[in-house]
Image: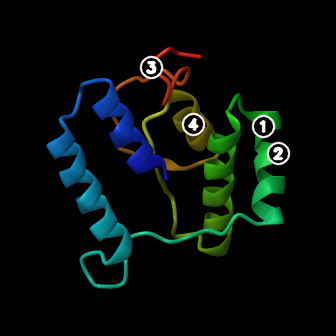
Amino acid sequence: MEVPAALRRKQRLGELSPEATALLADAFAWEWAIGPDGSGAFSIVDLTDDVLETAVRSLGRHPLRAYDAIQLASALLARAADPALVEFACFDDSLREAARAEGFSLVPPDAPATRARGRGNPRGS
């Protein structure tokens, strides 16, 4: 949900054309559903009580928005199930810092700074 939302926000802000947005959204949908090896490039983590409880606990350690805490909690639980999952991809500064503090390697490692406030809302509230 985060990737399509970010693409649509970039389009609303005039940073992407409708054509580029559609192309990128289609490419992401392909990666999501099929991926290069036919098995999908992403893992789905269900929104369970464990995810929500972990998200609530992470809010006590990190200044995150609710949805960001759910993303971090999902990654933490996925890593607990498979310790090889050590990378965390995002561009939001607060979420990146929380993931780094939790021991994840960040992707991309040198992401440009973003403003967490106002994501998805051009008025910034």
Q: Is residue 88 above or below residue 34?
A: above
User: Is 112 situated above or below 75?
Assistant: above
Contact flag, marks 1 and 3 (Cβ < 8 Å)? no
Q: Which residue is mark 1?
A: 59
Q: Which mark is residue 17?
A: none
Q: Given contact means CB atoms under 8 Å apart, are the residues at marks 2 and 1 in contact?
A: yes
Q: Residues within 10 Å of mark 4 (few under 14, many from 20)?
A: many
Q: CA distance from mark 2 to mark 3?
A: 28 Å
Find residue 51 and report its horizontal and vertical position in percent. Answer: 75, 60
Residue shown at the point (22%, 51%) measured from the top left: 22
- Whether tag 2 and tag 3 are in contact, CB under 8 A, the answer is no
Amino acid on which disc 3 is placed: Pro
Local secondary structure at mark 2: helix
Q: Secondary structure at mark 4?
A: helix
User: Residue at label 2?
Assistant: 56
Q: CA distance from mark 4 to mark 1?
A: 11 Å
Identify the residue position indicated by label 4 in the image: 95
Cα–Cα span, label 3 and label 4: 20 Å
Left or right: 53, with 99 as reference point: right
Q: Percent position (x, y) of residue 100?
A: 56, 40
Q: What kind of residue is marked 2?
A: Val
Q: Nearer the viewer, residue 28 or 60?
A: 28
Mark sitting on residue 122: 3
Question: What residue is drawn where x is 42% and y is 36%?
Answer: 91
Residue 20 visible here:
yes
Kind of residue at disc 4: Leu
Mark 2 is surrounded, within 10 Å at the Cα level, by few (under 14), some (14 to 19) or many (20 or more) other residues, namely: some
Quarter of the image with the C terminus in it: top right
Per the model, the C-alpha gap separating discs 2 and 1 is: 5 Å
Disc 2 versus disc 4: distance between alpha carbons? Answer: 14 Å
- Of the two numbered discs 2 and 4 on the same chain, state the one appearing first in sequence: 2
